[in-house]
Structures are given as C-alpha cells and as structure tokens.
Image: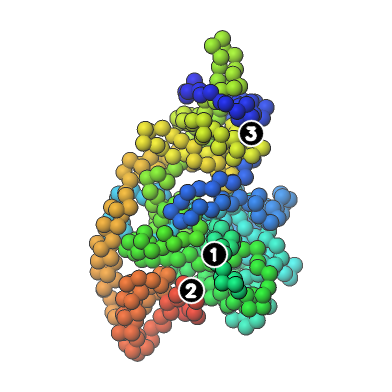
Amino acid sequence: MHGMCMTVHDPSTSFRSACLYFPINTHHDFTRQRPPARNHTPTTMGVEVPEIGTKDLDWRPIRDRDELHRLRDRVGQILGIPEDRGRRQRFPGAQPVSFSKHHLDELKHEDYYVCEKSDGLRLLMYITQERGGEVVYMIDRKNEYYQLPPSMHVPCAGDRTLEQAVHRDTLLDGEVVYDFEKRVGADGVETKVKRLNYLVFDCMVMDGKRLVERTYDKRLAYFRENIGVPYEQYRVKMRTEKRRPPPLFIKEKGFEFAYGMVHMFRNVLPNLTHGNDGLIFTNRIAPYEFGTSDKILKWKPAHENTIDFRLDIEPAKTPDGHEDFDLIPSLHLYQWEGGPSYTYFAPLHVDTSDWDRMMRERGDNPMPGLIVECRLDKGGRWRFNRFRPDKEDGNHKSVVEKVLRSIEDGVTERELQSHDWEIKKAWKERNAGGNRGERTANYDRAASIVSGSGSEVRDVESRKRRHSAEEEEEGVVKVARTGSAQPKEVQHETTE
C-alpha cells in the first residue's frame, strides 16, 4: 500500500461506508461519478462563505441530450469554433496559468489588469431568444447547461423601458458567488443579507457580434455599455418598485492596473463580501483564448496553490490479510493524462479530522472516482482541501507540472508588492510614445476599466482634464471612465 492506516473511532466513517458498495477498481479504470454537493465553508482572504454548487440553485438542468447538443452547437457556432472532432461539445472557457517568478518580468513588459480571484462557481452566461421570449442559460465547466427562471432579465442599452428589448446570442464569462451585503433596516439595525451575484470578467459575444478576437479592454467596454450600465439602471428600478429580487444579480468585476497590487491587498481583499483565494492578472490587449491561456495569470498564496486529482481508495488490512473496514483506508491520487487515462501520482495524507470531513462532504456519493482539490503541506504531503463537483476530470498532467513549478518557484505577497513601482514605471514608459491624441485615447480606454479608487484614479482624471481640449480638436472619442458604484454611459473608440 502507498499510504498509512489510522484508527477510525466512528463506525459510520468506515471504508465500507465511504465506498457505498462501489467496487474497488484495482486497475484504476475510473468511471465518472456524480460529485457531491459543495457544502464546505472555506476560510479565505475575503469572508467565510458557503460554497456553491448547481444542485443548490433553482436552475433547470438541460437533461435532454438533443436539446443540450443543439445549445452547445449554437454557442460553438457564434464563437466560431469548428464542428470537427466534437470541439463544440467542450467547455469553451479560458483557463489561467499559475503565476511564477518569470511572470514578474511579463507584468513589466506588457499591460495587465488585476482583479481579485473569487472563490465561487465558474460559469458562462448565454442570453438569447427562443420562441419569441428571453432565455438565460448558465454553462458550467463540464459544459452542462442550466436554464434560469423566467424572472431573470438582462436589459439592453437604448431601451428606455429597460424591459422590452432582449439580447440575442450574447455570451459572458464570470463567476457566481454568495455576497453578504450589509443592510440597515427602518429600525436602524444593521443586518447581513446573503445575495447571489454573477461577477462578469469577460464578454465573448454581444448580440451575435463575436468579440473573442478583440482586445480585453474593448471586450469589457462592450459589456459595460450594452449590459453593465443598463443593468445598474434596471436594479435601481427593481429596488424603487420593490420588486422581488431576480435569481441572481449581474455585476462587473472590479479591475485595477497591474501595479495596483498594493491597493488590492490593503483595501480590496480585506473588504470583500465573498470568498477569495488570490489574484488574476489579464493581458490588456490579448484576444480571448479557448482553453488554457498564458495571458491570464493566476496568483495564489502558497497555502492556496492546489491541484485537482482523481481519488481512489485501497482498504486497510488486518494482520491476517483480511480487509479491515474499521480503519481509515489508504487514499491515492491519480493525475489525468487526457481522455480516459489516469496515472498514479502520490498518496493523500489524511488524519482522523480530514477523514471525518471528507465523509461529511461527499454526501451520498461513493468516494472512489471523485475529483479532489489538494494542497501540499510544509512536510511535502498532499492534503485534502475539498471535493470539486464542478469538474469532470482532474488537472491535466501539463497543468500539474506548471502548478508544481509555481509552488517551487512561488512568488510571495510581499515579493509581488515590491515590484509594483517598476511595473508602473514600465507601463508609463510603454504608453508614452505616439501622438498625443492616440496616446491619450489608448490610455483612457485602459483607464476606463479600473474600478475607480486610489491614487491612480486621480492620475487618470488629472490627465483627462489636461488633454481634453486637444482630444476634441483631434477628434478622438474617449472611453468615459465608469466608477464602480454608479456606472455612467460609456463610449469607446471603436466597436468594429
């Protein structure tokens, strides 16, 4: 056996109970198992919040295979994904790479935005029209579709009623989180309200217009103008008319320039109302990439760097060679090689408390074959973090290698912050060339994305005032910067 056995004090947490009569597959030919509901409450850099699973939400899963195939094919079509080899049937969302030391130089050589990495449920939102009505679908990492209740409405720009016009073939990328928002009642008592929010961090298609080839700042400008602004107005209308809240609220993620890391650590992360496990850096001018993108960088503190594996269980044995169901079994982690293939990676170290938690969180699901998120402890042992019900497979071996390099070559929070001045200096120098009108327009478009706080905003506003007259003379149309609290009308240099 690859691991060690420990005594279990509660018979209900035995190996037999864990397997639920699931046959142990000694050849590791894993079958896909339905994952457990996510009910673990993680400790994060934001607040402690319950995890979210699609089973917890009042959304209708699309179970009809023909309907599901049609939806996947339509989304693949509007994204320009070829039909060959079933590519349209795969999840098209971009995936980040782990942050390593060499990425510090990349932040100095190229323009990047930074936002907090929410600890939520990654989903695409597909908004369209069917049979003359508005329909909103959420798409998870397994490329499964869920239809939101009819009360979910996404207003359009230019519709004064905010309710008559509807979007067609619009695809957003984001994450669903539980936010605990403060509310003061008529009696002056402050309470916390749990609210389901969809935090948008990219826009792939807007009303049939494919945006994946556009730069990141233009994609975000499209979202803000066509959905972000009218949705905020719609929220005000719902609140004023005291309507019942929608199934979830849409919000734009808050962004800063890459050199706003100090502000993120000092002011943003401590005040989040949802869970957080790091930062995301996204290249300002990169197109949207399906699958892994080396222009999206995922930074996590050392204790948050994790890898997803497939789990297998080997029963403990008595001295005479019989299976002992009263002992914690040996747990083994398997690395995904692609397709149906997995190879042994390492043992999973568990103590009694780990095992008890795993038994609670697995629900009614057999444990062998589930995907588990694991971290490396200071002793070099892999430990259980949580189950991953949103994932069909563990991390591919190429991702595992990158995460291991990131752990070995990790960048600490202090080290990251120590480079902010050099990153800012390089950004300013890089954007100092060209004629003044072009330079200012590019700068303002980049600045329009930042969330609107800190000294950088004062710098942006000062620069705008200084060059406004010259911009008008040169015919440059700027992107109006939008504050995070009350978005205003947005114009951008070009939408073609």
Q: Do the residues labelled 3 and 2 touch (CB within 8 Å)?
A: no
Left or right position of 30 against 100 = right
Q: How is the image coloured?
A: rainbow
- Where residue 60 sits: x, y (%)? 70, 55
Q: Can residue 156 be seen in this view?
A: no
Q: What residue type is labelled 3?
A: Pro
* Badge count: 3
Mark 3 vs mark 2: in front:
2
Sequence-wise first label, 3 or 2: 3
Q: Farthest residue to the top: give it.
A: 320
Q: Residues within 10 Å of mark 2 (few under 14, many from 20)?
A: few
Near-viewer residue (43 or 388): 43
Numbered disc 1: secondary structure: strand
- Where residue 414 sits: x, y (%)? 29, 53
Q: How crowded is mark 1: few (under 14 residues within 10 Å), some or many (20 or more)?
A: few
Quadrant for residue 345, please give it. top left
Left or right position of 287 against 362 = left
Residue pictured at 36% horizontal, 42% vertical: 407
Sequence-wise first label, 2 or 1: 1
Above/below status of 47 relative to 431: above
What is the number of the mark on residue 181? 1
Mark 2 vs mark 1: in front:
1
What is the number of the mark on residue 366? 3
Residue pictured at 59% horizontal, 14% vertical: 322
Alpha carbons under labels 2 and 1: distance apart = 14 Å
What is the number of the mark on residue 485? 2
Q: What residue type is labelled 1?
A: Glu
Alpha carbons under labels 3 and 2: distance apart = 46 Å
